[in-house]
Image: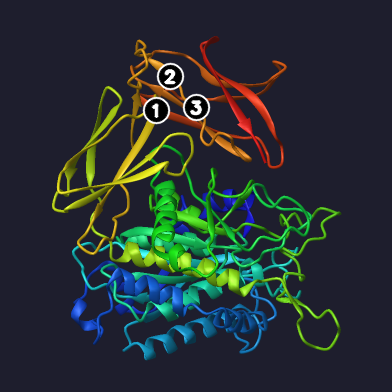
């Protein structure tokens, strides 16, 4: 996990000049053909097809093993460093030995499952720490239906680092960042390859993340260049630790040595009509309805406002930049903000201290672990359940949204072949306030709603009860049945989301009629009237958004005002409470 400023510099080299700078080669032609959807599913059909949602969900929950995750990290840490510029030839040290081990694990899992899992490397040529050729490791589990050729990616980066970006001599076990994410991907390849999915699943372990998201960029560029369709990307980075450091990139933990093993954060780009946020909501819904009732330790999933922590970035970002739906899982607590150049930095992240644990009594045995393997297992289950349900999900519908009185009227216009549909409705947060189900009709009415601006999306439900990913969002204002309708405004400043907020919030402006203007901005003032920030905003028809990052552990109430060509139009109050 790296500083975002490095990512910005890498983008100009890799994303926008990708065709000239990077050569991407898949080492397994069969895996490539499967990802393209150019294969006969019968070739990879399991003797016993296990594809019922309950079988998949309960199987993942039962079979993900904390002991397996522990064993993987024990091996990974012993390669001493996995810096992208480290040794590629040694059998016992460096990134080369580590990636060979991951590849061999994928081969072992394939052999146990009728050779249905196809291991491969994605070889890409770009200079990282004086090394010019690098390899991502991945395994492809072919889907049973090629009518929709889009694939699902579960990923985590394997490379590690110390303070020096290219220091290959230091001990860089990188157990939290990101041995935890690597172990999660390996474990899901083991567990999930037993089952069958309509969509193809790809278990991806990237390299070069710490120096500029190079491995994620390489795979995204490869997919785009070859016409590989990607349905979703679930990125896992720093996903197993539970201890808060002295520092942590906001939004994160409340204070040094705080322990949290029951919450996980989902980061994704955008606000209104963001498919990335929609994916995060879907992950949370599937966990709530399928895993939480059977979980021995229930988890709380927090949908975060920004795409990543302040000033940081991960391998989901290059996928999103190329138009693929992507999000990131990160532990609730992190030990450090990776600001290793600070003279006062004492935390573990991006140092030799990012190890598996400590031997407190000097008996040669680790007594206290920095990675909580039960917590990592719970996060692995959340990933697997979401990917599994997306893997067997039906088509996403489309719809229209109208209002009458205090009612919302939903009418399905695309993919009307299903008997059931679900409607996600939200108002003041990025999570749904309610999810409704309607049956046997293409039209449904949600009645007696109080006055508010409602944001709505829909999903199909197949005969086995599996939801599709949710559709695009539509927005409608409701005037409650006991309210007096107000004259519609050409421009409306909406309530920020979420409110109350933690470290960041999205401010939205609804433009109902096209307006001519020279300049528009949001003015944010404290309760004493002092302006603390101006954020420019473009006012196109529909909903327009800007994000205000107030900062973590900074509470307060503020007034924000829409100003167009120097004239205040409308003001609202927002609250930060953390």
Query: Across the whole image, how many numbered discs are drawn on residues?
Result: 3
Answer with mark 3 or mark 1, whichever residue precedes in sequence: 1
Depth order, front residue of 559/101? 559
Q: Residues within 10 Å of mark 2 (few under 14, many from 20)?
A: some
Q: Is residue 488 above or below residue 466?
A: above
Please identify, in this view, whether the residue under mark 1 or under mark 2 is nearer the observer. Answer: 1
Depth order, front residue of 481/371? 481
Q: Is residue 464 above or below residue 484?
A: below
Residue placed under numbered mark 2 in the picture: 492
Please identify, in this view, whether the residue under mark 3 or under mark 2 is nearer the observer. Answer: 3
Q: CA distance from mark 3 to mark 2?
A: 10 Å
Whether residues under marks 3 and 2 lie with C-beta atoms below 8 angstroms apart, the answer is no
- Which secondary structure lies at badge 3? loop
Depth order, front residue of 428/170? 428
Whether residues under marks 3 and 1 lie with C-beta atoms below 8 angstroms apart, the answer is yes
Answer with mark 1 or mark 2, whichever residue precedes in sequence: 1
Q: Is residue 389 above or below residue 546?
A: below
- Residue 135 in the image: state x and y as whole percent: 50, 74
- Which secondary structure lies at badge 1? strand
Residue placed under numbered mark 1 in the picture: 453
Q: CA distance from mark 1 to mark 2?
A: 11 Å
Q: Residues within 10 Å of mark 1 (few under 14, many from 20)?
A: some
Q: Residues within 10 Å of mark 3 (few under 14, many from 20)?
A: many
Whether residue 205 is visible, yes or no, is yes
Quarter of the image with the C terminus in it: top right
Q: CA distance from mark 3 to mark 1?
A: 9 Å
Residue placed under numbered mark 3 in the picture: 495
- Residue 12 in the image: state x and y as whole percent: 53, 49
- Residue 97 in the image: state x and y as whole percent: 59, 84
């Amino acid at each position: 996990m790296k500083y975002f400023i490095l990512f910005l510099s890498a983008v100009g080299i890799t994303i926008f000049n990708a065709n000239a700078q990077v050569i991407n080669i898949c080492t397994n032609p069969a895996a490539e053909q499967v990802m393209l959807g150019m294969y006969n599913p019968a070739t990879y059909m399991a003797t016993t097809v296990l594809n019922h949602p309950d079988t998949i969900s309960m199987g993942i929950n039962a079979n993900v093993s904390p002991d397996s995750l522990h064993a993987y990290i024990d091996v990974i840490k012993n390669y001493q460093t996995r810096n992208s510029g480290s040794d590629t030839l040694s059998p016992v040290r460096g990134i080369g030995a580590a990636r060979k081990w991951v590849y061999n694990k994928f081969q072992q899992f394939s052999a146990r499952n009728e050779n249905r899992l196809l291991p491969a490397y994605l070889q890409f040529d770009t200079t990282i720490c004086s090394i010019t050729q690098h390899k991502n490791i991945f395994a492809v589990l072919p889907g049973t239906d090629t009518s929709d050729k889009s694939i699902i990616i579960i990923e985590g980066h394997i490379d590690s680092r110390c303070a020096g970006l290219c220091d290959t001599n230091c001990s860089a076990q990188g157990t939290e960042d990101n041995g935890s994410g690597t172990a999660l991907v390996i474990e899901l390849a083991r567990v999930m390859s037993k089952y069958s999915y309509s969509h193809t699943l790809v278990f991806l372990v990237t390299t070069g993340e710490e120096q500029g998201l190079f491995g994620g960029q390489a795979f995204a560029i490869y997919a785009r260049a070859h016409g590989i369709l990607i349905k979703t990307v679930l990125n896992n980075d720093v996903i197993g630790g539970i201890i808060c450091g002295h520092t942590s990139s906001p939004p994160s933990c409340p204070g040094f040595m705080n322990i949290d093993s029951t919450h996980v954060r989902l980061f994704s780009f955008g606000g209104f009509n963001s498919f990335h946020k929609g994916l995060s909501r879907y992950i949370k819904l599937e966990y709530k309805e399928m895993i939480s009732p059977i979980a021995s330790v229930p988890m709380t999933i927090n949908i975060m406002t920004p795409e990543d922590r302040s000033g940081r970035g991960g391998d989901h970002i290059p996928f999103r930049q190329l138009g693929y739906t992507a999000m990131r899982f990160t532990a609730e607590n992190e030990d450090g903000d990776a600001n290793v150049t600070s003279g006062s930095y004492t935390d573990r992240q991006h140092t030799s201290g990012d190890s598996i644990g400590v031997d407190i009594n000097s008996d040669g045995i680790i007594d206290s672990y920095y990675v909580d393997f039960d917590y990592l297992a719970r996060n692995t289950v959340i990933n697997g359940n979401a990917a599994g349900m997306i893997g067997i999900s039906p088509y996403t519908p489309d719809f229209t949204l109208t209002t009458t009185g205090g009612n919302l009227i939903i009418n399905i216009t695309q993919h009307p072949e299903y008997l059931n549909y679900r409607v996600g409705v939200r108002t003041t947060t990025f999570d749904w306030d309610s999810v409704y189900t309607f049956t046997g009709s293409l039209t449904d009415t949600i009645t007696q709603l109080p006055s508010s601006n409602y944001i709505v999306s829909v999903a199909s439900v197949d005969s086995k009860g599996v939801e599709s990913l949710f559709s695009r969002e539509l927005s409608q204002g409701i005037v409650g049945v006991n309210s007096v309708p107000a004259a519609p405004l050409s421009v409306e400043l909406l309530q920020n989301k979420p409110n109350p907020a933690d470290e960041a919030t999205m401010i939205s402006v609804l433009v109902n009629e096209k307006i001519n203007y020279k300049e528009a901005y949001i003015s944010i003032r404290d309760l004493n009237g002092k302006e603390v920030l101006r954020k420019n905003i473009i006012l196109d028809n529909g909903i327009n958004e800007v994000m205000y990052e107030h900062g973590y552990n900074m509470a307060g109430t503020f007034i924000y005002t829409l100003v167009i060509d120097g004239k205040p139009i409308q003001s609202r109050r927002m609250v930060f409470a953390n």
